[in-house]
Amino acid sequence: MSKNTEFVKFDKVDKSYDGKVLVVKDLNLNISEGEFITMLGPSGSGKTTCLMMLAGFETPTNGEIYLDSNPISNIPPHKRGIGMVFQNYALFPHMTVYENLAFPLRVRKVQKDDIDKKVDKALSMVSLSGFESRMPAQLSGGQQQRVAVARALVFDPAVVLMDEPLGALDKNLRESMQYEIKHIHENIGVTVVYVTHDQGEALTMSNRIAVFNDGKVQQLSSPDKLYEEPVNSFVAEFIGENNTFGGEVTDISKNVCKVKLQTGEILANPISVNSKGDKTTVSIRPERALINPKDKMDNNQTGKIEEVIYHGDHTRVRLDLLGNKQFILKVPNSSNELDLKLGNEIKVGWNSQDARALDPK
Amino acid sequence: MSSETKQILTTDGIPLEISLKKAERKNKIKAFLLVAPLLLFLIITYIFPIGEMFTRSIDDKMITNMLPKTFKSMETWDGKELPSEEVFASFLSDFKILVEKKEHGKLAQRLNKEKNGFNTITKKLFRQVKRNKIDETQSIKEQIMKVHKRWRNVEYWQAIKRTAPPYTSAKYLKAMDMYLNEDNKITQVSEDRRIHRILWLRTVEVAFFVTVFCFLMGYPIAHLLATLPMKYSNLLMICVLLPFWTSLLVRTASWMILLQQQGVVNDFFVMIGLVSDDNRPEMMYNKVGTYVAMTQILLPFMVLPLYSVMKTISPSLMRAGKSLGGTPFVAFWKVYFPLTIPGIGAGCLLVFILAIGYYITPALVGGASGTLISNQIAYHMKTTLDWSFASAMGLMLLGGVLVIYWLYNKLVGVDNIKLG
């Protein structure tokens, strides 16, 4: 079965609410069939607006959205056949779990027997069999969430949208729900468009992540690529932890460049700098910088320990390094007997390939 | 469950429940003292007057006290033939006392209410007594019977006997155009005198339709209020509340200006050619005026509870309904509407109860065909001074409202009411 790689297609979509500010700017996004794609971004970045346009509750100011090659801008929400899980679940409080799940089937005039079967199946999928006659208020937050997911899937929609569905749950429950949703997606192969501002959630669940900022997709790639190879400093900053140095390119070759900082000089991987004199922000992941490196590395610096924070599985060390007092290191709490004391000077090294010279902040 | 579990003791060995009660007693007393003024206020201004109204409405002690001996001697009378000499004698003795106290007029009035014709014959008897014409050594029965032929009619004596009990349901029966006839049977008054039943029906009808109109107009307004952005909804809210800030009388008077035959609305209709100048429709001093004015005045009582309920309904519920495939109508009817039922119940109950006892507006714009039972109550309070009748009607109104409340509780459940 060849999969349609343009199952959902945003084509040059603009959206403005007041005619003055563009909330979404020239959005082009292809989502392939069966994909789990996450729109990730800070609040106000336009990700929820995109979801609402896809669901049909907002109309694009310009451009067109295609679902399976059909333009859908003029189709009202109830005819789009898109399932949606809302932020606060939006379960109908006056209906039982069964009635909630049967609602999309009843409005589609499905036979009673088939309704029973499908509701049964959907409930067992979220392991809530036997809860049919409960009212939503009698369920816990996690259970309500699972009912909402089941309801959005029960009528076999081609696409399911999820608008920060786990935002109201506590941390442990949120993590287990992440896996649960991911497994459901893997089992039934439905296309999922997921919106969240929680990067951990996005990294765990998605096939691809679209990072939104300021109405634009900053980067669209798989979770690992997004983390390892951010294309600009916003993405680097937004996804995971990040040590940055601001400076100026003094020398550049194909895959290494020299960046002059206020104090000192480092080697970096030129991503979005082209020529000498470009301003840049160099970004290094905390776990890529090692203390007393055994392997030879092309950046070797000395820093002073400012703070040591115990984190259970690892210890965070804050250094004053090359004038950056917020340089973070992650030290696994396993083997070495490093002397991590306040005020100590330690050697830190990293490869220039892991130091990405991005656009200036 | 608590009986099965072992009694729990505090660390000092006192049973937990007792200790808890002790700890909370002070708070309970405080709480009671806080509500005590209100409780007292309610007892004085509400419960006591209603009790007073009730006793007044069934009280018939006046005549019982006027004719004690008569009623005593009548106890053995079978009520078929004319009563015995003894009854006549005790009646005369009672009557003489009344004449001395100059209360015989009251007696005549009361008896006349029971049966027409008592006025004349009581006056005649009074004159005889005054002139000392009745010789107590002779047969009193014969002498009284000679005063007027009606004293010889057994029906009049039966009427006196009927007034003997200190309590009567006559006022309540009268309010329903009925009375107790000679055989103590509930009978309807003749057709041309049945006015109260029409008024009751009209009151219920007006209250019902005003409630319906308020609902039809208030529901969209409340929805708009709940969904509009704050700056518009505040303005709209002020428009809804504006009538509250205007005196009821002013509002009713302005409706009179609008609705009268030479009024603004009629002028407008003539101007746009909807009606001819010499054929202006009557929109006031009839039911139309009552409907229009009462709907406008009671509208906020519908809008506010509806608004407070709608405000709590998350807009994502309607969206969920639509995204799951319901047309906007289905989403509204299956999702939104059921969730507003507590507000609808509260609003309708409030408007209906207020409308059923409405007084000023129907009195001013209602005319003859638009007056309601409350106007009748006021009439008896102020004009005929038949307070017991007014009390009876007032209590029947209260009873009706309680029945509606009870019905509502059965159908919808009072717990579901949300007033704000």
Image: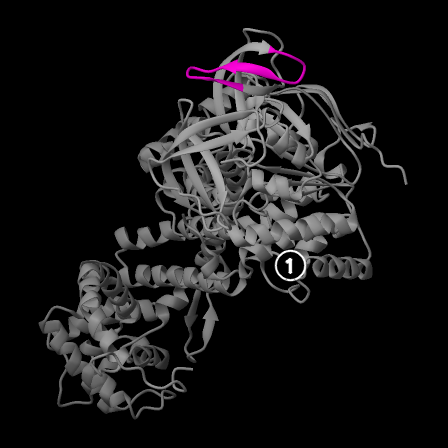
Q: Chain of mark 1?
A: A
Q: Say if the magenta span includes residue A264.
A: yes
Q: Residue at x 32, y 85 (%)?
A: B7
- Looking at the image, residue B93 sits to the left or right of residue A135; the answer is left
Residue B292 % position (x, y): 48, 37
- The answer to whether one can see residue A122 in this image is yes
In the image: residue B6, left or right of residue B281: left
Q: Nearer the viewer, residue B51 or B137?
A: B51
User: Within the magenta stretch, is there residue B405?
Assistant: no
Q: Could you tell me which residue is drawn at 65 percent across and 26 percent down? A: A219
Above or below for A18 versus B391: above
Closest to the observer, B353 or A69: A69
The type of residue carrying mark 1 is Val
Q: Residue at x 67, y 67 (%)?
A: A130
Q: Position of residue A267 (x, y in %)?
A: 56, 19
Q: Which residue is mark 1?
A: A97
Residue A255, given in percent of the width and then of the height, sits at 66, 18
Q: Is residue B173 above or below residue A200?
A: below
User: Is residue A354 shown above or below B126?
Assistant: above
Q: Secondary structure at mark 1?
A: helix
The magenta region covers: A252-266
